[in-house]
Image (cartoon, rainbow, N blue to C red):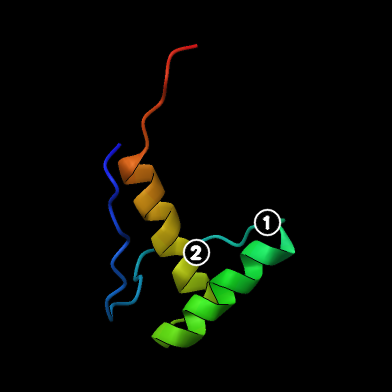
């Protein structure tokens, strides 16, 4: 997979949503919070953008 960057632009997610619970390593959460602070986005927005990117760019390998 090519080294593609996740570009974060000013735009809010506007679709329907559901509340979930998620456990993350503390170090990862610190990075997410830093990105949120640096971009003026919420933690939730960063997570949604990251998940959208991952889903659009993932490759499922055969075992």
Number of on-image labels: 2
Q: Is residue 16 visible?
A: no
Most distant residue in the top direction: 63
Residue 49 seen from this side: yes
Q: Residue at x 42, y 88 (%)?
A: 40
Residue at image point 45% right, 72% down? 45
Q: Is residue 61 above or below residue 49?
A: above
Residue at image position (69%, 57%) is 24
- Residue 4 at what x, y percent from top left? 28, 52
Q: Which residue is more in the foreground, 2 or 16?
A: 2
Residue on which the image places disc 1 = 22
Q: Nearer the viewer, residue 3 or 59?
A: 3
Is 40 situated above or below 17? below
Quadrant location, the N terminus: top left
Vertical comparison of 42 with 7: above or below: below
Mark 2 and mark 1 residues within 8 Å of each other at the beta carbon = yes
**Is 14 positioned to the left or the right of 32 in the image?**
left
Percent position of residue 26, x then y: 73, 65
Residue under pointer 2:
47
Chain-order first, disc 2 or disc 1: 1
Q: Position of residue 51 (x, y in %)?
A: 44, 54
Find numbered disc 2 in the image and state the secondary structure of the residue it sits on. helix
Residue drawn at the location 68% of the way across and 65% of the way down: 27
Q: Nearer the viewer, residue 54 or 13?
A: 54
Residue 17, given in percent of the width and then of the height, sits at: 48, 62
Residue 12 is drawn in which quadrant?
bottom left
How far is mark 2 from mark 1, CA to CA?
11 Å
Left or right: 38 as drawn, with respect to 18: left
Helix, strand or loop status at disc 1: loop
């Amino acid at each position: 997979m090519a080294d593609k960057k996740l570009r974060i632009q000013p735009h809010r997610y506007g679709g329907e949503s559901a509340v979930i619970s998620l456990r993350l390593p503390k170090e990862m959460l610190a990075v997410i919070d830093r990105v949120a602070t640096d971009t003026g986005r919420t933690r939730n927005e960063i997570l949604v953008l990251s998940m959208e990117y991952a889903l659009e760019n993932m490759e499922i390998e055969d075992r």
